Image (cartoon, rainbow, N blue to C red):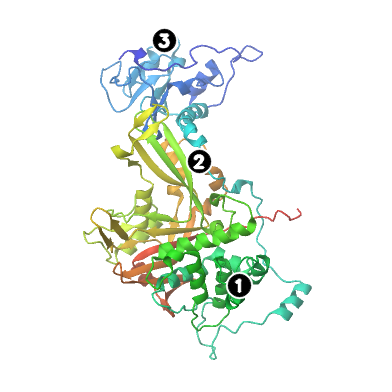
């Protein structure tokens, strides 16, 4: 193949102006262990790949290759005429050769072999040393490739900038110190509180009962509400917020005169103003963690929710996931009105509901013709996953710990009807896998200026403190005019690593694992444990679509409990693993405290 068929116009081959020092010797830049690359840089200058961006062609999914002219011509080795999978082009003369004939190329240029030892992989845009017969790394080269790969996404990102998550790298960390009351605080505590009853029964041998375990009476097809409330009441960041009196229902009612209080309802004031769901949730926390073990009736909370979601106000069975979204929306709306200023849910600062559950999803739509990528960001408070059937475990979770977990769970014999087993990791793999959009979903490519076929890929830009996964077990077909429930078993781990599904990980894999920071790195790099999650609640659904029952499993102090309306029983891990998961709640293993802005350093 002629060397002019590849467009490689690098600024090397001669000493660049200004690349010599005052003594007349070339500027030398350290390039690691490859002496041939170091020699090239010492001869050419500090940045021999400054013009390389124009030589890179970005293909769909961000894969970089060398631009060819004409584009569709088959590239062959100039020495043997073959077209093997890996071909290289000299960065100086653009001669093309295969791996077998790579070592002989520098010797064939006897006039100056040191300038012909470095080549570039045509299909992967990676440096290759003919002398070392191996790939070599150069930061300036990777900078040019990454800039070319990310340049196409700029236009699509300008119109819809991502919500600005808290940058954990800029936080000032403080060491956790247990709180001990001073003398004045001890006086206030003694005068304004009463000690909780003992956790032990009359017999000292009675096993300890976990605080907060209190049944919720069924008020008539309200198991959907009881199951979600049990999960919310034991969500660690949410529990700590309300038990720390961050939202005091008495103060809230005095501050907001427009909010209907219970007394105003009794006096006949029944206008259309919504009740404060956060106040009723605060009352629920006080009742559940009071030490009393008798079941309670969440009638006040149910009434407040009916006022917020009037279209769902009935004694019919409702969807637990829909109730969960509606409750968080009601808390957000009430607290947003109290603050009087609009904040993006993706920022996590607008209310406690979004501070705990809100994350940010990244959506990339890529043109299959030119590689142009349009990127958008959307806040989310949960992730809905299709029940994807996959043979064996997920390919992304290959650690020994995950393998042992899968093996232990597979031995339980819970397989789907066709013998294949589903897992939560497989569902997440399917969620973040590139998807080819149909011909009826062509998007307008700003580079091609026409509608083109495209690929779409989802990823997680920002992880929440608590990740809620909703499994799509209820299918509704408009064409067939029918609905059905998917009863396939789903494996879910007790420990989950979310790093393979982050935008930073997916972009790094898409761009060839180059050593650069990608989207989301600044948030995640400061804490390697921020992507490690632990399971603490599972909501299950048994029965048919229109006649089922919801139950919640809670993990408290490494012990599992089954919350079935008013009845709470202790269960084993195997019972939980065998349950038909509908909603799973995971909390970050390590939660960081940050210094108060008013703290004097």
Numbered disc 1: secondary structure: loop
Of residues 511 and 285, which is closer to you in this image? 285
The N terminus lies in quadrant: top left
Q: CA distance from mark 3 to mark 2?
A: 45 Å
Of residues 535 and 33, which is closer to you in this image? 535
Q: Residue at x 47, y 71 (%)?
A: 230
Q: Is residue 558 visible?
A: no
Above or below, comparing residue 19 to residue 408 in the picture = above
Label 1 crowd (10 A; few <14 / some 14-19 / many >=20): some
Describe residue 182's horizontal placement relative to residue 337 as left or right. Answer: right
Comes first in the chain, label 3 or label 2: 3
* Residue 510: quadrant of the picture: top left
Numbered disc 2: secondary structure: loop
* Residue 204 position within the rendered picture, expressed as x and y whole percent measured from the top left: 54, 88
Comes first in the chain, label 3 or label 1: 3
Q: Residue at x 45, y 29 (%)?
A: 136
Q: Is residue 195 visible?
A: yes
Q: CA distance from mark 2 to mark 1?
A: 46 Å
Describe residue 194's horizontal placement relative to residue 366 as left or right. Answer: right
* Residue 590 position within the rendered picture, expressed as x and y whole percent measured from the top left: 55, 58
Furthest residue toward bottom: 202
Of marks 3 and 1, the one in the foreground: 1
> Which residue does the numbered mark 3 point to in the structure image?
110
> Which residue does the numbered mark 2 point to in the structure image?
519
Of residues 230 and 329, which is closer to you in this image? 329
Numbered disc 3: secondary structure: loop
The label number, if any, that marks residue 261 in the structure image: 1
The label number, if any, that marks residue 486 in the structure image: none
Comes first in the chain, label 2 or label 1: 1
* Residue 441 position within the rendered picture, expressed as x and y whole percent measured from the top left: 33, 39
Are the residues at dot 3 and dot 1 in contact (C-beta closer than 8 Å)?
A: no
């Amino acid at each position: 193949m002629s060397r002019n068929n590849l467009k490689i116009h690098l600024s090397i081959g001669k000493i660049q102006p200004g690349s010599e020092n005052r003594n007349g010797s070339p500027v030398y830049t350290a390039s690691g262990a490859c002496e041939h690359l170091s020699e090239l840089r010492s001869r050419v200058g500090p940045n021999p790949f400054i013009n390389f961006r124009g030589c890179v062609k970005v293909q769909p999914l961000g894969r970089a290759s060398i631009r060819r002219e004409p584009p569709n011509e088959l590239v062959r080795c100039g020495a043997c005429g073959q077209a093997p999978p890996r071909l290289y082009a000299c960065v100086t003369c653009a001669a093309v050769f295969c791996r077998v004939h790579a070592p002989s190329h520098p010797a064939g240029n006897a006039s100056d072999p040191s300038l012909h030892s470095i080549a570039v992989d045509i299909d992967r845009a990676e440096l290759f040393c003919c002398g070392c017969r191996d790939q070599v790394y150069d930061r300036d080269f990777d900078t040019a490739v990454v800039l070319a790969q990310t340049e196409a996404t700029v236009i699509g990102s300008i119109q819809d900038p991502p919500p600005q998550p808290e940058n954990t790298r800029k936080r000032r960390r403080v060491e956790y110190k247990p709180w001990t009351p001073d003398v004045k605080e001890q006086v206030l505590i003694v005068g304004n509180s009463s000690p909780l009853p003992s956790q032990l029964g009359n017999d000292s041998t009675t096993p300890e009962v976990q605080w907060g375990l209190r049944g919720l009476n069924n008020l008539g097809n309200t198991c959907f509400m009881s199951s979600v409330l049990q999960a919310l009441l034991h969500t660690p960041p949410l529990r700590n917020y309300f038990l720390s009196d961050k939202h005091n229902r008495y103060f809230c009612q005095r501050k907001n005169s427009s909010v209907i209080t219970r007394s105003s309802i009794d006096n006949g004031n029944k206008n259309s103003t919504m009740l404060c769901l956060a106040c009723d949730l605060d009352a629920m926390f006080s009742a559940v963690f009071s030490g009393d073990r008798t079941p309670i009736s969440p009638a006040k909370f149910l009434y407040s929710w009916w006022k917020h979601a009037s279209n769902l106000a009935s004694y019919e069975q409702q969807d637990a996931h829909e109730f969960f979204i509606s409750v968080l929306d009601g808390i957000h709306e009430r607290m947003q009105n109290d603050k009087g200023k609009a904040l993006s849910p993706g920022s996590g600062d607008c209310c406690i509901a979004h501070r705990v559950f809100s994350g940010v999803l990244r959506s990339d739509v890529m043109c299959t013709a030119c590689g142009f990528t349009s990127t958008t960001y959307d806040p989310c408070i949960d992730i809905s996953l299709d029940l994807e059937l996959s043979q064996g475990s997920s390919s992304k979770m290959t650690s020994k710990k995950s393998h042992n977990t899968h093996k232990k769970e597979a031995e339980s014999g819970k397989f789907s009807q066709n013998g294949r087993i589903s897992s939560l990791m497989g569902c997440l793999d399917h969620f973040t896998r590139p998807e080819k959009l149909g011909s009826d979903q062509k998007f307008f490519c700003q580079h091609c200026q026409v509608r083109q076929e495209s690929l779409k890929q989802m990823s997680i830009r920002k992880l929440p403190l608590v990740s809620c996964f909703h499994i799509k077990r209820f299918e509704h077909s408009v064409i067939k005019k029918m609905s059905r429930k998917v009863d396939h078993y789903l494996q879910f781990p007790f420990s989950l690593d979310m790093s393979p599904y982050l935008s930073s990980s997916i972009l790094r894999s898409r761009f060839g694992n180059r050593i650069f920071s990608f989207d989301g790195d600044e948030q995640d790099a400061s804490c390697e444990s921020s992507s490690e999650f632990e399971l603490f609640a599972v909501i299950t659904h048994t029965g048919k679509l229109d006649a089922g029952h919801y139950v919640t499993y809670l993990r408290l102090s490494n012990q599992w409990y089954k919350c079935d309306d008013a009845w709470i029983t202790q269960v084993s891990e195997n019972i939980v693993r065998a349950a038909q998961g509908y909603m799973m709640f995971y909390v970050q293993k390590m939660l960081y405290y940050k210094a108060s802005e008013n703290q004097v350093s």
